[in-house]
Image (cartoon, rainbow, N blue to C red):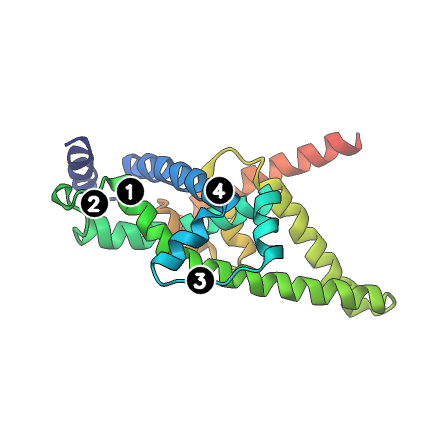
Amino acid sequence: MADQHMVLLLARDGFAGRRYERFAEELARYGISVFRAWMHSGFLFQLLAAHGFDLHPDEHEIEELARDGDVREELATMTVARALPRFRQRALVEGGWNRDGGASVATYFIGACVYEFPNEYRRHRSHQERWRRAVHQAGATAENPTVNNVASEVLGRLRVLDDLTNICDPRMRTAVALTLDDYTQEEIKEILGASSVRAVEGLLYRWRTAARREEGERHG
């Protein structure tokens, strides 16, 4: 009943605006938390296989997810970010979710994330392979400026990914992660349900300001 009432309130605002933004933030926090836990335990791959998405992770990949919180954070954040706009359209705008279906809004959203994760994990694998090749090539040909530029870009991206776990605001974390994944600010605005591109710029500006301040403190 509470979910039904909440959806009715959101519908009055056209599933946009501050009320929807707060709703999406809470949903994102929940989704990220669930997926981090499922990746850490390995349960996510079992669930995906049961739904027909067998990603065939090898031993190294399973160990990486169990060990590396930054990787779990990035994958969870990106999965949730990509799932949110589809969930908004299909579950809310088009009425795909209803209380008679038996699932809560949060559970329905997690289901949407489950279907989004395989594509995100394949992208992650592709990125990892490119980074490995770039770093290997950089080590083999250190005098090549083009290779050095690639290596610097890779290492810079890795540093930003390390910082994702320190971003408490899920909307800011999502905006940064999507920027890393080459989304435009217009696309990020649509995914976040933000009021304008300027709002996205504000999120990224606050993140850059905080990152520069922390960098200065580390070297001060």
**In the structure shown, which secondary structural element does the residue marked by tag 2 occupy?**
loop
Amino acid tagged 4 = Arg
Real-space Cα distance between discs 1 and 3?
20 Å
The residue sitting at 15% across, 38% down in the picture is: 8
Which residue position holds label 3?
119
Q: Residue 3: x and y, percent?
A: 20, 35
What's the amino acid at mark 3? Asn
The 10 Å Cα crowd at callout 1, few under 14, some 14 to 19, many 20 or more, is few
Marks 3 & 2, CB-CB < 8 Å contact:
no
- Answer with mark 3 or mark 4, whichever residue precedes in sequence: 4
* Residue identified by numbered label 1: 107
Q: Residue at the location (65% across, 66% down)?
A: 130
Mark 1 and mark 3 residues within 8 Å of each other at the beta carbon = no
Badge 4: residue crowd in 10 Å (few <14, some 14–19, many ≥20) = many
Which of the 4 image quarters holds residue 220? Answer: top right
Image height of 62 relative to 211, above or below? below
Tell me the residue that label 2 is attached to. Answer: 14
Marks 4 & 2, CB-CB < 8 Å contact? no
Where does the image place residue 66, in percent across and percent down from the top left?
57, 45
How packed is label 3: few (under 14 Cα within 10 Å), some, or many (20 or more)? some
Real-space CA distance between mark 1 and mark 4, rounded to the nearest whole angstrom? 16 Å
Label 1, label 2: how many angstroms apart (C-alpha)?
Answer: 22 Å
Pinpoint residue 62: horizontal percent, then vertical percent: 56, 52
User: Gap between marks 3 and 4, in whole Å?
Assistant: 17 Å
Q: Which residue is identified by label 4?
A: 36
Q: Residues within 10 Å of mark 2 (few under 14, many from 20)?
A: few
